[in-house]
Image: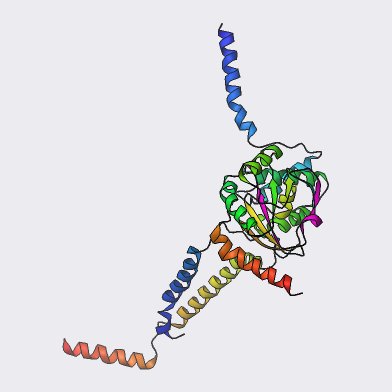
Amino acid sequence: MKLIRLCGLALFTLLLALPATAVIETYEFSDRELELRYRELSQELRCPKCQNQNIADSNAPISQDLRRLLHQQLEAGATDAEILNFMVARYGEFVRYRPSFNGVAVLLWLAPILLLLIGVASVLLMMRGRRQQSTALDPAEQQELSALLATTEKDD
Amino acid sequence: MPPRLKLFLPLILFLVLAAFLYRGLSLDPMAMPSALIDRPLPEFRLTELADNRPLERDDVIGEPALFNVWATWCISCRVEHPYLQQLADSGVPIYGINYKDEDEAARRWLQDLGNPYRANIVDREGTLGVDLGVYGAPETYLVDADGIIRYRHVGVIDERVWRDTLEPLWREIAALESTP
């Protein structure tokens, strides 16, 4: 009796796990290397419908389609560049989380370096400015100071 | 730089930043320009919904037309359907791309709601959809007589969309047509 109940419980928990496996389909790859590339590319390609998700995480119909295409093209022997070009030709530069180094995207790639250079330059400029403000008094200032000291001493 | 001017640096920085942020308020973050603008309508070999006859690119180009991506599972498509009918009645050629749908359901939809389409391309697997860069329905493409895609509208076409964006382009293309 106890065994039957245990079996029932086990079956029930298995059923609970079903929806989890139904969410994202799995693909068989002829080569382990293809599977690694699939994983990498599906994480780099952005879902056009649900922006801010890659096609590996998204369950939108369009992401399912793109994953299927990705699998087909990998199995057909396409290179990474060919696959990315295929996607960009249809969905624009938008589908890449790592935009290519051309056009307006160059600005995007270079902006951090540019900002760093501006920062370093301004720090250097500020330091040079500070060094020039030396604390030593020139003869005229020294004379003025002595005069002031002399007057205060007289007041005492 | 004179020290007086240096005082204004924070203000200038603030104004530049404010200008960018203000511009950002009116930008649509979901807006995604089509990669196929000014490119030819992709080649395809599919079938027609009503009679299953083969249909390809050459069968549907030759005059400026709208290509409307629709499906029975798409609720917004039902919303725009009456307006498409109105456009078709006023003489705008509209081709349907029945996107990832079931033929039987699609035929019933046209029977019940009316058929604004010259012909319906059955894209059951969404292959033409991917070639077009479709990522949902409804989407509508404005294609000129040479089969070049001139504009893509994502979402429902209503009177305002037609009047403000599609109709001016439509007139422009039609005008080019009449002056060879």
Q: Is residue A121 above or below residue B60?
A: below
Residue at 73% across / 72% down in the picture?
B178
Residue at 65% across / 68% down in the picture?
B171
Q: Is residue A115 visible?
A: yes
Q: How is the image coloured?
A: rainbow
Q: Which residue ends up furthest to the right in the rendered image? A: A77
Q: Quadrant of residue A19?
A: top right
Residue B157 coordinates in the image, percent (x, y): 58, 56
Q: Quadrant of residue B151?
A: bottom right
Say whether residue B37 is magenta. no
Q: Which residues are magenta?
A: B50-74
A147 vs B68, left or right, is left
Residue A52 coordinates in the image, percent (x, y): 58, 51
Instruction: Give the position of the C terminus of chain B as an image quadrant.
Output: bottom right
Q: Is residue A97 visible?
A: no
Total marks drawn? 0
Between B138 and A95, the one nearer to me in the picture: B138
Say whether residue B58 is magenta. yes
Residue B109 coordinates in the image, percent (x, y): 64, 42
Q: Which residue ends up furthest to the left in the rendered image? A: A156
Between A129 and A38, the one nearer to me in the picture: A38
Residue A37 coordinates in the image, percent (x, y): 74, 46
Residue at 56% across / 69% down in the picture?
A115
Between B124 and A38, the one nearer to me in the picture: B124
